[in-house]
Image: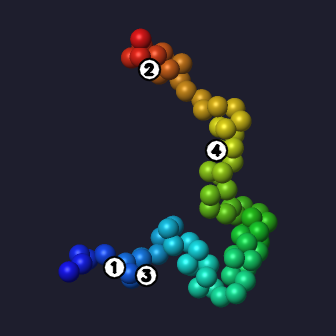
Amino acid sequence: MKAAGEGDDARTTGGGAGNFHGILNSFGAGGDERMALMADMIAGTEGARVPGRRRQQIRADYLENGIPVDADLAASIRAIGA
């Protein structure tokens, strides 16, 4: 006997980020292109933003410049390892 949530159809309900491609597939052929077009239209609208774009930019900035850390906090962390 399988517990609730186990089995072949465990992911058919709930969706979520793990099912993003399944969601795109539900739009039929060309669904990913339509979603990209819609995202571009939203991004081109004054005052609107596509979810995740800000996070992507922050991540890129951190990769390029490092993550800013308060000097006192950094000193405390170094003291733990000493």
In this view, the mark in front (2 or 1): 1
SS at circle 2: helix
Taking the spot 47% from the left edge, 75% from the top edge, the residue there is 15
Q: Residue furthest right?
A: 44
Q: Residue 16 appears at what percent x and percent y?
A: 48, 70
Q: Residue at x 65, y 44 (%)?
A: 58
Which tag is nearer the camera, tag 3 or tag 2? 3
Element type at mark 1:
loop
Please give left or right for residue 64 compared with residue 12 in the image: right
Instruction: Please say if the residues under marks 1 and 3 sit with CB atoms less than 8 Å apart.
Output: no
Q: Earlier in the sequence, mark 1 or mark 4?
A: 1
Residue under pointer 1 = 7
Point out residue 78 in the picture as x, y percentages from the top left corner: 46, 16
Q: Quadrant of the C terminus?
A: top left
Measured Cα–Cα span from mark 3 to mark 2: 45 Å
- The structure residue drawn at horizontal position 62% and vertical position 61%, both measured from the top left corner, is 51
Label 4 or label 3, whichever lies nearer to me, is 3
Determine which residue is flagged by label 2.
77
Task: Determine crowd level at label 1: few under 14, some 14-19, many 20+ residues with C-alpha closer than 10 A.
Answer: few
* Res. 56 mark: none
Using the numbered discs, state the Cα–Cα distance from disc 2 to disc 4 in whole angstroms: 23 Å
State the quadrant of the N terminus.
bottom left
Q: Earlier in the sequence, mark 2 or mark 4?
A: 4
**Residue 43: quadrant of the picture:** bottom right
Name the residue beneath numbered marker 4: 59
Tell me which numbered mark, 4 or 3, is placed earlier along the sequence.
3
Q: Work out how far the residue at label 2 is from the one at label 1, CA to CA, in angstroms.
A: 45 Å
> Of marks 1 and 3, which one's residue comes earlier in the chain?
1
Q: Amino acid at mark 3?
A: Thr
- Residue 25 picture quarter: bottom right
In three-dimensional space, the C-alpha distance between marks 1 and 3, rounded to whole angstroms, equals 10 Å
Residue 27, compared with residue 4, is above or below; it is below
